Image: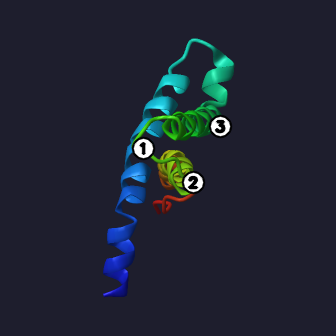
Amino acid sequence: MVLQEIIYTNLDKFEHIALYAGFGLILYLTFSNSKNLNMQKYAIILAILVGALYGVTDELHQYFVPNRSSSIMDLFADVIGVALAQLMIILTRERKHIELVFKNILSSNSIKPKSI
């Protein structure tokens, strides 16, 4: 029952995380496919910074809109969403790299049994 209350009262935080995770993925894809090599190199950092800055401006603008509320917890949820997307990208890239390393090790001649 307590878990249900926590989830129900903070449901909008999960929405913030999900939406900003998608936004973070779009930001990463934008920067990583840029013609600018520095943007490609720092795509993950740029995605987090731009996503966080957008979250700040979004919460700031909501402060001035009637019948809307601004919340630091919403901002935290926004940043968590963008950061989670970047973490998933890093983990996916690392997994592919590890698989490539193992594939190369297993396909090298030094690992194969020698024929008599």
Q: In this view of the protein, which residue sits in the foreground, 73 or 65?
A: 65
The colour scheme of the drawn protein is rainbow
Q: Are marks 3 and 1 in contact (CB under 8 Å)?
A: no
Image location of residue 21, percent across then percent down: 44, 45
Q: Are marks 2 and 1 in contact (CB under 8 Å)?
A: no
Task: Name the residue: 53% across, 33% down.
Answer: 61
Q: Is residue 26 left or right of residue 31?
A: left
Image location of residue 83, percent across then percent down: 55, 49
> Reading the chain from its start, which is encountered first: label 3 or label 1?
3
Image location of residue 99, percent across then percent down: 48, 52
Q: CA distance from mark 3 to mark 1?
A: 30 Å
Label 2, secondary structure: give it.
Answer: helix
Q: Does 55 sit above or below residue 108?
A: above
Q: Residue furthest top?
A: 35
Image location of residue 26, percent across then percent down: 43, 31
Task: Name the residue: 38% across, 44% down.
Answer: 19
Residue highlighted by disc 1: 68
> Reading the chain from its start, which is encountered first: label 3 or label 2?
3
Q: Amino acid at mark 3?
A: Ile
Quarter that holds the N terminus: bottom left
Q: CA distance from mark 3 to mark 2?
A: 17 Å
Q: Amino acid at mark 2?
A: Phe
Residue highlighted by disc 2: 76
Q: In this view of the protein, which residue sits in the foreground, 110 or 13?
A: 13
- Which mark is nearer the camera, 3 or 2? 2
Q: Amino acid at mark 1?
A: Arg
Label 3, secondary structure: give it.
Answer: helix
Label 1, secondary structure: give it.
Answer: loop
Residue highlighted by disc 3: 45
Q: CA distance from mark 2 to mark 1?
A: 17 Å
